[in-house]
Amino acid sequence: MAGVLVPGDSVIVRADSDDGAGDNQKAGRPKSNVGQNKQARDAVRDYERQTGRKLSRCQLRQAHDEFGRHPNPRYADLIDILKDTFGD
Amino acid sequence: MTNRTDEIVAKIEGTLIHEAVRKIALGLGSILLIELDSAEGDGFPASPSARPYIRVECAWRIEDKENVLAASEDPRESMALSLNALHSQVVQEVGVSLPGFDLRISFDSGHSLLIFPVYANSQDYENWTIQTTSNEDIVSGPGRRIQILSEG
């Protein structure tokens, strides 16, 4: 389906964490966008470490799509999304 | 430029120019996910995984000829709204600024997507990834590295 994919049903709530830098912050949601970007990469790496499986380029693409569809995920939610999508 | 840099710049240009934005979305934070496809629309559409694709995990900005429309630390609603400007637009030109591999992707509508790597010494984070239709990923990162990865 062509079109702009926007998580339109999401309610945007600013950070529930005070960590503006977002470095390795895994408990909540970093305040800055770049901090959240890092969290996505950290979650994928953690998932790969936990499962011993490396995501393929297509799976990585899918993972980022899935992250964007969830409103305000915390770090643990990201890991759950990966487990739900690719298995644990 | 070295031969390798020439090769990478040529691959970036060859992958993106004349392709149209078919999907554009935000991932987590300000991660930008862009799927492109042939602007001509000839033949059968490629499967999504075979289409050129850009993932931007660093800083970015969208401009038209006169205004800055959005930037990557804006509120999410504002960023998401501004992405509409690029939908269906055809890539006309790609500027690659060395040595940092900043990208300026210009569209036929006059809009531009500017991409600024923000990691130089990190061993953990990529700046941007361009997936080609020949099963290769051109990756800026981790840190200042630029590499072409292929999956067997």
Image (tube, rainbow, N blue to C red):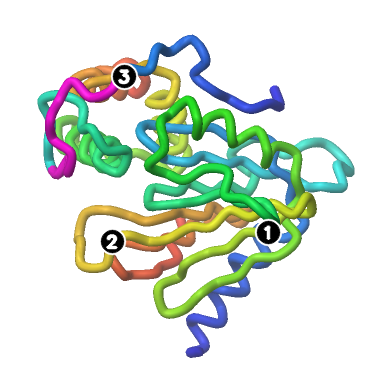
* SS at circle 2: loop
Dot 3 and dot 1 within a common chain = no
Magenta region's main secondary structure? loop
Crowd class of label 2 (few under 14; some 14 to 19; many from 20; radius 10 Å): many
Find residue B51 and report its image quarter. top right
Name the residue: 45% across, 70% down.
B101
Q: Residue B146, how many percent across, how many down?
A: 39, 69
Residue closer to the observer: A11 or B136: A11
Q: Residue B131, how many percent across, how many down?
A: 54, 52
Amino acid type at circle 3 is Asn
Q: What's the mark number on residue A72?
A: 3
The answer to whether the residues at label 1 and label 2 have Cβ atoms under 8 Å apart is no
Q: Which residue is mark 1?
A: B106
Name the residue: 21% across, 40% down.
A42
Task: Tell me: residue A88, above or below residue B13.
Answer: above
Mark 1 / mark 2, whichever is N-terminal: 1
Amino acid type at circle 1 is Ser
The answer to whether the residues at label 3 and label 1 have Cβ atoms under 8 Å apart is no
Amino acid type at circle 2 is Tyr
Residue closer to the observer: A59 or A29: A29
Q: Which residues are magenta?
A: A14-23
